[in-house]
Image (tube, grey):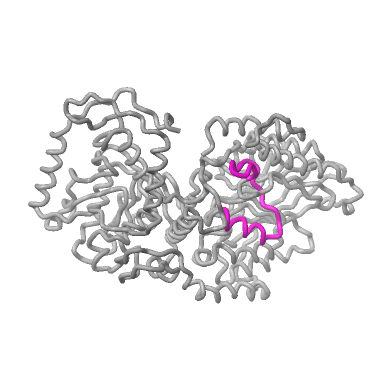
Amino acid sequence: MASFAAQAALRAKWTDLVESTDVSTNVTSGMKSVVGWLKQASLDVREVGRRTLTNLSMPQEKITILHYNDVYNVDQGKAARFLTAIKQFDSETPLVLFSGDALSPSMLSTLTSGAQMVPVLNAVGTHCAVFGNHDFDFGLEVLSKRVLDTNFPWLMSNVIDNETGRALGDGKVTHAVDWKSKRIGLIGLVEKEWLETLATINPDEVTYIDFVEAGQKLTSQLKQEGCDIVIALTHMRMPNDMKLAEKCDEIDLILGGHDHVYSVEIVNNKYIIKSGTDFDHFSKITLKFESGSHGFDITVDKIKVDEMYDADPDLSIELEQYTELIEGKMDEVLGEFNVELDGRFEMIRTSETNLGNWVCDVILAATKADLVILNSGTLRSDCIHPAGPFTMRDLMMIVPITDPLTVIELTGREIIEALENGVSMYPKLEGRFPQVAGISFAFYPGRTPGNRIERDLVKIGDEYLKPDSKYQLATKTYLRQGSDGYTVFKQAPIIVDEENCLELGLAIQNHFNAIKIRLGKTKQCSKHRQSLVTLSRRHSLVRMLDGGDLDGPTPLRKHLPNSDAVPEKVPRFSRRASLDELENESCLLTPRIERRIITLTEQLGKDLLAEKERSFSDTSIIPEENEISPQDYS
């Protein structure tokens, strides 16, 4: 992991390096790659500036731009009709620009890792694009392959990959084109909010440059080097696009994505345009320049793509090959389990199972939430999966539909309410019965619904649940909307929405891929991969190494009676080794029953409550002074 000081150094050098082609001879080796990256960005801009008007076509006073963003599903002729709609403007020689999100999520992408989107992006004549968050869903190795297969540049102007010293995803920092009578500069900006949610990218291994600062610096540079106008391709929420428009006077036009809406706003005398989603719409933007001037008037036409457009026959034929590939992909081996997985409805809808535990652990690691509650109806195979190779067919049997995930915030009291709903129909084989991770609970099936959860035995990680404390819970969007009786989720604040979360099937695929990376079974050698270990397990280990089990809020520690000893710091290498052991354990693929869900009799309930009381009486809880910060070990 890059140290804070190293990242600060990268960040501090950004401004000077963008503006200079001179590389100091005394920079560190770690900085040289970043220097080269930023130097190349500056050289790219200067190359545009050196081009002369003799290389341009005859001046024209009108430029047509076609813009689209956030496209996912190519089936049912949507993509092929979209191409036909785009082609109707071929006579105007349009500049086609894309604002990110194509490779995921969709059911077909789950099987092809987004390969089916490449011929579409190429066929519509895309000239330049910015990366979207979902373009990273399958990891950098897959993204690199997709970028190589497209015939246009991708931009990432304000995020550095610390491992390579280049733009994240091997994108370009800037791009410029000579279009009719004008020179057009392009930059690609993203927001930090979604960058921090990427399951396949290690946030400690990237350096983020604020989009306003990057926009100001790069736009100024492009204008100085001869660009007539600068267009920012963005993948950000509208408030950040509006902030960019307000703060960056020299940007002429903002073409955005990420928000799945069609929207046109004017801020600081510049247009912000978002062009819908999923091949349903695109924008035709006409720039009309006054003769001999860089000033222009703009008109925006919203183009709706529906059945009035015939599907392009050539693209339709090309996309058919991907549907034919599906059957072959079904036998692809994702990983190998050392134990059988129990997905039988009679078990998974009434009790804890190792399949439910494993799936929920994957969600917990991918979302970095405190806990997971998943309705068992999500897991559809209704069979025992034997130990041995686990294929895409097995995955599709278990999770046959696209299931977006989300993270919400709940109080302890609301979590208990959700659990009460989950066990309310027991012993009926209802899909609302929960499978969980990061939480353990016990319930009395003989009591009336709504009074079955033993509240004093609910634990979040190592700590007993506190009714008024707030916790981050990962679940499906389906449940967040109140389905299956989980109405308590409907009003919960959304911490990470489905747009910034992985789809469940993809999270599982990424887990297998992370194991391969961990074991050195892929070509990629990178720290960027989905986590194999949940944060709760990491925190449990850290607390254990710091001085014993935790049995209360973070500032409290459990000490043996009559012991005044202060836990010694655990050396960093010991901590790292122990975390490595956790990851190695996850690679073994041996999920098991862990008493996350306990079915109580009245007597067993009394026994467990008495055991809890004894554990408290045998120890004393004292405030810990001089709390050791985790940074001390980094």
Task: Depth check: give the residue in front, 320 or 425.
Answer: 320
| Residue located at (37% from left, 59% from top) | 589
Q: In this view, does 501 lie above or below 338?
A: above
Q: Position of residue 223 (x, y in %)?
A: 78, 38
Task: Depth check: give the residue in front, 339 or 60.
Answer: 339
Q: Position of residue 522 (x, y in %)?
A: 53, 58
Q: Where is residue 195 in the image (x, y as percent from the top left)?
A: 53, 44
Q: Does the magenta stretch include residue 520?
A: no
Q: Is residue 106 visible?
A: yes
Horizontal arrangement in the rendering, residue 562 relative to residue 187 (left or right): left
The total number of labels drawn is 0
Quadrant of the rendered structure where residue 238 is?
Answer: top right
Horizontal arrangement in the rendering, residue 74 relative to residue 548 (left or right): right
| Residue farthest left in this picture | 603
| Residue located at (73% from left, 47% from top) | 175
Quadrant of the rendered structure where residue 469 is?
Answer: top left
Q: Where is residue 432 in the image (x, y as percent from the top left)?
A: 28, 60
Q: In this view, does 446 lie above or below 42?
A: below
The magenta span reads 140-167
Q: Is residue 166 magenta?
A: yes
| Residue farthest right in this picture | 54
